Image: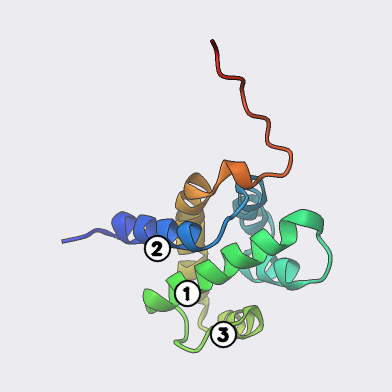
Amino acid sequence: MTNIDQIRAAHALSACSHERLKRSAISSLPCLIINNGLLATVAYVKCEGGGANRPHQVKAMESLADHLKNQGITNQQTNTLSIFANDLANNSPVNLQRATAEALAYFSFLKRFADMNADDNAVQAPIPD
């Protein structure tokens, strides 16, 4: 029998094994969700621009959409960020709260499994002799 943390961890690990996600890009998403809300964060990630982090944030948000779909929180048809945002906006306030709480919990796993080596400016400590 698996618990919800195991389900989150398995999905996050699977997402990180398929995509090389930058930890620094993902670590800003929970702060954005707390300060602005999940819907505003999805809109922000969906917008043009954002520099080198934006493609990683889009992949992370798509992974979240898939996870929420698997948990039955969002519609089964959420396969793009536009549809995901529309589904969240037209859902009940309780489901939006549930999705927000689940997003924060999910991103805690996703950022831990993200590849630090995907960071463009990652500084690796020298190996002692």
Q: CA distance from mark 1 to mark 2?
A: 9 Å
Image spot of residue 111 (x, y percent): 53, 49
73 with respect to 85 (left or right): left
Where is the C terminus found, in terms of image quarters?
Answer: top right
Residue at the far front: name it. 129
SS category of the residue bearing label 3: helix
Image spot of residue 98 (x, y percent): 45, 68
55 with respect to 7 (left or right): right
Image spot of residue 105 (x, y percent): 45, 55
Work out whether mark 2 precedes mark 3 in sequence or the reverse, and give the earlier one.
Answer: 2
How many other residues sit within 10 Å of disc 3, few (<14), some (14-19) or many (≥20)? Answer: some
Looking at the rendered structure, the number of numbered marks drawn on it comes to 3
Work out whether mark 1 precedes mark 3 in sequence or the reverse, and give the earlier one.
Answer: 1
SS category of the residue bearing label 2: helix
Q: State if disc 2 and disc 1 touch (CB < 8 Å).
A: yes
The numbered dot on residue 11 is 2
Q: Which residue is mark 1?
A: 66
SS category of the residue bearing label 1: helix
Residue at (50% x, 82% y) in the render: 92
Work out whether mark 1 precedes mark 2 in sequence or the reverse, and give the earlier one.
Answer: 2
Tell me the amino acid under the disc marked 1: Asp
Residue at (63% x, 50% y) in the render: 22
Q: Which residue is mark 3?
A: 87
